[in-house]
């Protein structure tokens, strides 16, 4: 993986450009997120050992993105959602590159598209009432874990744990489609409330401030630019603490274990050289 990380990042960047081009052409608000925004601020591009790319889109804009991307993405790309892929368990979508493969132990046995990808997360409202908030988050977490296990995620890494087998047992009476429908209902109910905070259903904490997603600016990123929330400092402090400090060497890990870039190997050969 180490010697191929730059090639992999070039392919991920190819996907990210396609996704953000669709957003910008159709006036869809988006922000690079997580380690991608951290990389833009701290490294002007990818974190050197990072092998993923995150984009967030407010829920109303996210629905628009799914509708348009399903029609406008070129044939080299595949938009994967929990609707068009039965064993895909997440409440967010991925845009993957056909003809490539990236494997993680957590998802290796799942019957999904395993191409190199970019994650696109919807931003959802978080109920302001603390009791309702806790109940909705509990429902969401329970359903998320039931769906992950039923879809075949975690077999190689968690199948011998008590927690995994409890979820496996609890999920037995229900179909994957039923559990996904219940989760969508929980998220829809969250979005029927107004509050100052928001969250990502699959990774709800730390909570986010809705005001962050009102102002955006461009960030330099590996010889291109992407939009991100303007108040990066407040966001990165909440997510990463002292974000300009590099983590210890032993924590600088890639997520994937096996990568095949197919015809997209050396996609930016001139840049790599």
Image: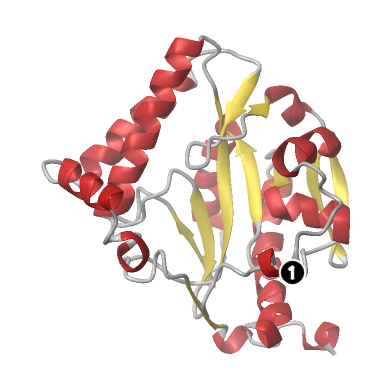
**Left or right of 196 on screen, residue 113:** left
Q: How many marks?
A: 1
Q: Quadrant of residue 126?
A: top right
The quarter of the picture where the C terminus appears is: bottom right
Residue 144 location, x and y as percent?
36, 41
Residue 204 location, x and y as percent?
53, 35
Residue 27 in sight = no
Q: Which residue is mark 1?
A: 249
Residue occupying the point 33% across, 51% down: 148
Residue occupying the point 38% across, 27% down: 138
Q: Nearer the viewer, residue 193 or 131?
A: 131
Element class at badge 1: helix
Residue 115 location, x and y as percent?
49, 72
Q: Nearer the viewer, residue 77 or 181?
A: 181
The quarter of the picture where the N terminus appears is: bottom right
Q: Does 81 sit above or below residue 155?
A: above
Residue occupying the point 48% across, 36% down: 201
**Left or right of 11 on screen, residue 96:** left
Q: Does 26 sit above or below residue 86?
A: above
Q: Nearer the viewer, residue 61 or 119?
A: 119
């Amino acid at each position: 993986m180490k010697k191929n990380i730059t090639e992999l990042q070039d392919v991920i960047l190819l996907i990210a450009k396609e996704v953000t081009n669709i957003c910008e052409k159709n006036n869809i608000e988006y922000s690079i997120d997580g380690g991608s925004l951290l990389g833009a601020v701290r490294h002007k591009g990818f974190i050197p050992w990072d092998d993923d790319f995150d984009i967030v889109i407010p829920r109303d804009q996210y629905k628009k993105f799914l509708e348009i991307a399903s029609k406008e993405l070129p044939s080299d790309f595949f938009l994967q959602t929990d609707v068009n892929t039965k064993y895909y368990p997440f409440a967010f979508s991925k845009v993957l590159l056909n003809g490539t493969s990236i494997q993680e132990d957590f998802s290796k046995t799942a019957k999904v598209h395993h191409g190199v990808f970019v994650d696109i997360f919807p931003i959802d409202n978080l109920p302001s009432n603390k009791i309702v908030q806790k109940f909705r988050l509990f429902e969401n977490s329970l359903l998320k874990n039931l769906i992950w296990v039923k879809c075949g995620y975690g077999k190689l890494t968690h199948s011998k744990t008590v927690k995994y087998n409890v979820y496996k047992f609890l999920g037995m009476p229900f179909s994957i489609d039923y559990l996904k429908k219940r989760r969508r209902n929980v998220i829809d109910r969250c979005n029927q409330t107004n509050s100052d905070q928001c969250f990502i259903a699959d990774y709800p904490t730390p909570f986010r401030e809705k005001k962050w997603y009102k102002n955006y600016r461009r960030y330099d990123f590996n010889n291109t630019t992407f939009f991100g929330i303007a108040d990066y400092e407040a966001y990165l402090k909440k997510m990463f603490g002292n974000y300009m400090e590099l983590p210890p060497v032993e924590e600088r890990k890639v997520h994937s274990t096996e990568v095949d870039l197919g015809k997209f190997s050396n996609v930016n050969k001139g840049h790599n050289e």
